[in-house]
Amino acid sequence: MSTKKEQIDQLITHIIQGIEDVKGNNVEIIDLREIENTVCDYFIVCSGNSNTQVDAIESSVRKVVSKAIQDKPWHVEGLENSQWVLMDYVDVVVHIFQKQIREYYDIESLWGDAKITSIESNY
């Protein structure tokens, strides 16, 4: 039986794979575990270049995670306009932004006390 940390690490790995499979960019992992009163352990933030790509990233993440570890998001928001889609996997929340919306909300700076890890794209 795997530990909660191993399960979260697997989830993060598969979420990132889903993002990279459809060329999502500027992927960052925001570690919230050391910050008090947070709703989850990690945010994963990425960008897409259009509504279509944001939808494709959401779909890819959902499929990769479901196939690999039989997990599905507890809740998904934002598919109506696909400018900012949020996928809630309870311990990990995925934020998929269009570039200009990500710049506007700048959630990375809101969590400035958190450890932020940038993921280099393989493309």
Image (tube, rainbow, N blue to C red):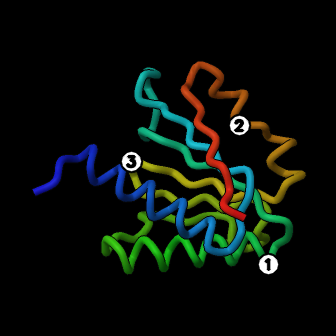
Does 78 sit above or below residue 70? above
Pick out the residue farthest to the left: 1
The crowding category of the residue bearing disc 3, from other C-alpha atoms within 10 Å (few below 14, some 14 to 19, many at least 20), is some
Q: Which mark is residue 91?
A: 3
Q: Nearer the viewer, residue 25 or 52?
A: 25
In this view, the residue in front, 33 or 79, is 33
Give the secondary structure at mark 1.
helix
Residue at point 50%, 62% (across, down): 15
Q: Relative to 57, is 74 on the left or the right?
A: left
Q: Quadrant of the N terminus?
A: bottom left
Question: Gap in Å between the C-alphas at discs 1 and 3?
Answer: 27 Å
Q: What residue did someone put label 2 on?
A: 107
Residue 4 location (% of width, % of height): 23, 47
Q: Earlier in the sequence, mark 2 or mark 3?
A: 3
Against 67, residue 101 (above or below) is above
The residue tagged with tag 2: helix, strand or loop?
helix
Say which label, 1 or 2, has the lower sequence index.
Answer: 1
Percent position of residue 110, x then y: 69, 28
Q: Judge from the rendering whether residue 57 lies leftward or rightward of residue 102; answer left or right.
A: left
Q: Which residue is mark 1?
A: 52
Q: Amino acid at mark 2?
A: Ile
Mark 1 to mark 2: distance in Å?
Answer: 22 Å
Q: Earlier in the sequence, mark 1 or mark 3?
A: 1
88 on left or right of 84: left
Mark 3 secondary-structure assignment: loop
For the C terminus, the image quarter is: bottom right
- Count how many numbered circles sit on residues in the image: 3
Q: Residue at x 63, y 66 (%)?
A: 20
Image point 81% across, 73% down: which residue?
A: 51
Residue 48, quarter of picture = bottom right
